[in-house]
Amino acid sequence: MDDPAGGQWERILAAVIEDSHLIPAERLTETVDRAVRPVGLGVQVLMVDLAQRTLQPLLTGDAAAPIPVEGTVGGRAYQFTEIVAGSDGAGDRVLWLPLLDGTERVGVLRVALAPGVVDDAVLHGRLWALAGLVGHVLMTKIGQNTWLQRFRAPRLAPEAELLWRLLPPRTLATEQVVISALLEPVDEVAGDAYDYAVGDTIDLAIFDGVGHDIMAGVSTALALTAVRNARREGVTDLAAQAERADAVLEEHDGPGRFVTAALARLDVTTGELTYLLAGHPAPFLLRDGQMIKELGQPPRLPLGVTVPGAATADVVGHEQLEPGDRVLFYTDGVTEARDENGRFFGEQRLIDMAERAELDHLSAPETLRRLVAAVLAHQNDRLQDDATLLMLDWASDRHPRLFPSIHGAG
């Protein structure tokens, strides 16, 4: 059957692709909006800030005010990665769609519908294809575009700039695994970092450099780079990766500097997880909405600390995961966050919130966003230490939660 509208949408996507090669980020909203005008739509691109608190319209000139992620229709589309219907101040129809780069949430697309436009599953599917394209284009522009970087993170301390440039995307998923990570405070993070690599096996790492200054970031950058380099050279043994980091830190880092870390490796076929704790808190294993255990293999010394005669054998732990399991890694800046009365956020509160998120069927990235928001609220939005979370979902049905449900929508 001929589909004239389908041909028109092919031309819309082709026009956006063609223009995207040369347009600056400042003109992305203008470009996409011009492409969809012939089908009775109006588009606005909004990018989430690095802290995931506001959605900023990408407009030049008199820039529109950002909207909060919490308590808004657009924010709901972002939180739950769903297509959400709403209206503007005049009562006209509006659709909000999540913008993804792969599975990394990067913002939302606001789509205004002219009176004659039919809001149905076909339109949702076409808009979802457009949103996917816009999300990819947006992130190809951000690396070298200072205007876009200021929208995403108005202020970054040098130590935060150092580490953010080293990190992989905060979320990545395949049909077998979902990985998500989050750092706070976004603008001043100094010594925390995370890393992962995806293939037939999944390599994960979380780091916490001693101190709260740029040298803590340097130590962490050295440790992360050493572990990453060892993996790329084919070193799969976690103890050997840690020893590689010891050597790099000992050669290049200052006296008294060290990095705690948790390194892990998952066989995505069998679910066997191997892990190593280098002076780092033990991760939690969640199953069926409950924390069933800490992965408490006795730790070795932190990375960069070498003591003659210290035990290096039996530092790698093994855990057999079951389909649907979640593993939550964290730094002590999460559990040791203190309120005005000196009370810790604590492990139990972290566990309770992680369990509740699983029972509420929240995706891994939204779970971490809410956990970090709770840690910040506990300290009146002023963290005393970096706080980092990394979550691994294995062999579950959770990856569809990262995408909107468009089939059967009306």
Image (spheres, rainbow, N blue to C red):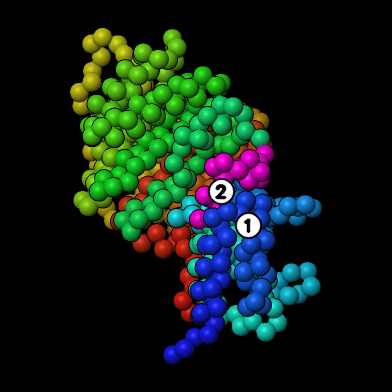
71 shown above or below 279: below
Which residue is more in the foreground, 305 or 343?
Answer: 305
What residue is drawn where x is 23% and y is 34%? 234
Q: Are marks 1 and 2 in contact (CB under 8 Å)?
A: yes
Q: CA distance from mark 1 to mark 2?
A: 10 Å
Evaluate whether residue 95 shows in this view.
Answer: no
Can you tell which quarter of the image residue 58 is in?
A: bottom right
**Magenta-colored stretch includes residue 152:** yes
Q: Where residue 250 sits: x, y (%)? A: 36, 14
Secondary structure, mark 1, is: helix
139 shown above or below 91: above
Q: Callout 1: few (<14), some (14-19), or many (20+) C-alpha neighbours within 10 Å?
A: many
Checking the image for residue 8, the label placed there is: none
Q: Amino acid at mark 2?
A: Lys
Which residue is more in the foreground, 254 or 79?
Answer: 254
What residue is drawn where x is 61% and y is 39%? 376
What residue is drawn where x is 65% and y is 76%? 38
Q: Amino acid at mark 1?
A: Leu
- Provide the residue span drawn in magenta: 136-154
Q: Where residue 374 sits: x, y (%)? A: 58, 43
Q: Where residue 158 sits: x, y (%)? A: 59, 27
10 shown above or below 344: below
Q: Quadrant of the C terminus?
A: bottom right
What residue is drawn where x is 66% and y is 52%? 26
- Left or right: residue 163 versus residue 157 is left
Helix, strand or loop for the magenta stretch, by majority? helix
Q: Which residue position is annotated with label 1?
A: 28
- Left or right: residue 256 versus residue 277 is right
Secondary structure, mark 2, is: helix
Q: Which residue position is annotated with label 2?
A: 141
**Magenta-colored stretch includes residue 107:** no
